Image (tube, helix red, strand yellow):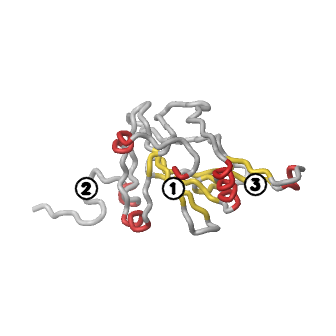
Amino acid sequence: RKKKKKGLFRRKEASLAQVLFPGVSPEEYNDNEPIPAFVELVDSQKTQLPFQYYDLPTCKEPHDAIQRRFRQRKNLGSRLMGYKLRMSPYSFPTKVNKGCTPLCFVEVGDKKLNWLRKLIDRQYRIHLTLDKLPVLMRSKELNYAMRGFPIGFKAHKASTGLEHDEYYFFNHLKFTITYREEPNE
C-alpha cells in the first residue's frame, strides 16, 4: 500500500519558486505577448498621505476591457490597506526591443504644477509592478537599487547658478527587463 506524501513538495507540478513565494510564481509568455504592468500608490517616506497614480497629471487609464483581461488578485494586506492596483499606461511586449515611444501629451496647469513641486519636495515615489514583481530604480555607478522611481528632483540654486531652485520632472523613463529562457524549449 502506498503512503500519501505530506509536506511542502506534495504535488509534482509545484516549483520551488511557488513554495517560497506564494502568488509570485514564474509566468510563461509567448513572443510579443504583453506583460501586465500595474501602478500602485504614489507615496513618500516623509509623509503618510499616499495618492493614486492617476491623480497625477499622467496619461489616461487603459480601457476596462484591458483591465479585466489582466486583473490581479489582491492579498489580504492590500485589501485591508485599501490598495487598488491599476493597469499602467506602459506597454511591455515580450522579447521586443522598443526605442523611445511617446505615450501621450499632457498639459499641466499652474495649480497642478505647484502641487507636483510639493510632491517633489516631499520625495514622493511612483511604484510599478511588472509581472507581479516590484520595479526597481537602479544605479550601477552608485551601486544601489530602490523600489519605484521619484516623481522628479529639485536642483538647488547653488548648483544651477540661477536665482531660484529648479524643479525637474521625470517624464522620460527607460526600462530594462531581464528574463530567463528555459534551455529545453
Give the secondary structure at mark 3.
strand
Q: Which mark is residue 37?
A: none
Distance (Cα) linking label 1 and label 3:
22 Å
The 10 Å Cα crowd at callout 1, few under 14, some 14 to 19, many 20 or more, is: some
Residue plotted at (44% across, 53% down)? 85
Relative depth, front residue between 132 and 105: 105
Residue 35 is left or right of residue 8, and the answer is: right
In the picture provided, is 32 more to the left or to the right than 104? left
- In percent of the image, x 49 and y 33: which residue is there? 95
Numbered badge on residue 52: 1
Q: Earlier in the sequence, mark 3 or mark 2?
A: 2
Q: CA distance from mark 1 to mark 2?
A: 40 Å
Callout 2 crowding tier (Cα within 10 Å): few <14, some 14–19, many ≥20? few
Q: Earlier in the sequence, mark 1 or mark 2?
A: 2
Q: Residue at x 88, y 55 (%)?
A: 158
Q: Which residue has dot 3 on it?
A: 154
Residue 42 position in % (x across, y down): 56, 57
Going by the numbered disc 1, the residue's amino acid type is: Gln
Label 1 secondary element: strand
Task: Report if the CB atoms under discs 3 and 2 are less than 8 Å apart.
Answer: no
- In this view, the residue in front, 136 or 104, is 104
Marks 1,2: beta carbons within 8 A: no
Residue 11's disc number: 2
Secondary element under disc 2, as helix, strand or loop, is loop
Which quadrant: the C terminus? top left
Residue mark closest to the camera, 3 vs 2: 3
Mark 3 surroundings: few (<14), some (14-19) or many (≥20) residues within 10 A: some
Which percent across, then down, holds residue 47? 61, 68
